[in-house]
Amino acid sequence: MVKLFTDADFPADPYPGARPGHSFVHFDGAGHSLDTAPEGWRERQAVLAYGSNACPSKITWLRENMGLTGPVVVCHARCTDLAAVWASGLRFRDGQRPATLAAAPGVVEEHAVWFATPEQLAVLDHCEGNGRRYRLVRLTAPAITLDDGTVLDDVVAYVGAADIRLPILVDGRHIRVADLEQRRAAALQGIPAETHGLDCTLVDAGTLVREASRD
């Protein structure tokens, strides 16, 4: 089977890591074409990956450290009216500043969407600290379009819950990840935003996993 790339082509450091600008299926430390995806992958839960979860090396880290299993289907997507922005706090383990999600009217960004199995969603939920650092929500008015033109209408995402994962405001404005590299982002001085500003509803991840398991 032909590999599109290996993890070494897309290192995880500095955060948020490097990522392909196209869709792929990740397994065995490498990316493969979307036609290798398991049957029925489009019926899985779509999860917006706007930070390090779009990085192939991070996906392998999830396998090695958190028990992630199976092929991971990752689709390239065009996202409107939202943005990956820098969070107000730093990561404890390495002092890097993570990303978080915020409303951004008129902004268009390219991100990744996992089509996750129930087991994969449970791993993401644990990794993101759902209910503590981040909170799992369903985007109620998503404008997320895959490269093949499919417009997704059921997308969940992790947004800031604790102050340290809400957007940082510098002189009253968000700082987009696309506009500032990690080295400079880590040195930002600002205050936490009061909210991410997104139209969304809270999701109980346990219920979502159980419902997906019955499908």
Image (cartoon, grey):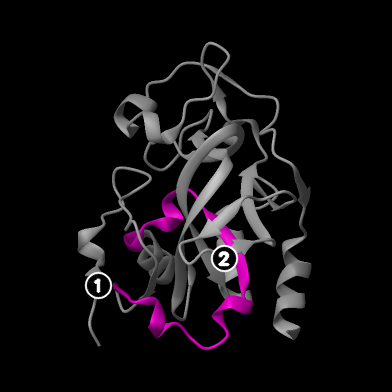
Q: Would you place residue 169 above or below residue 35 in this image?
A: above
The residue positioned 49% from the left and 51% from the top of the image is 78
- Label 2: few (<14), some (14–19) or many (≥20) C-alpha neighbours in 10 Å: few
The residue positioned 33% from the left and 49% from the top of the image is 17
Name the residue carrying label 2.
Answer: 150
Q: Which residues are magenta?
A: 30-57
Camera-side mark, 2 or 1: 2
The residue positioned 42% from the left and 35% from the top of the image is 177
Q: Nearer the viewer, residue 188 or 102?
A: 102
Q: Position of residue 202 (x, y in %)?
A: 78, 51
Q: Nearer the viewer, residue 87 or 144?
A: 144
Query: Disc 2 marks which amino acid?
Result: Thr
Q: Secondary structure at mark 1?
A: loop
Name the side, left or right, on which 74 lies relative to 193: left
Image mark for residue 4: 1
Q: Would you place residue 148 above or below residue 49 in this image?
A: below
- Label 1: few (<14), some (14–19) or many (≥20) C-alpha neighbours in 10 Å: few
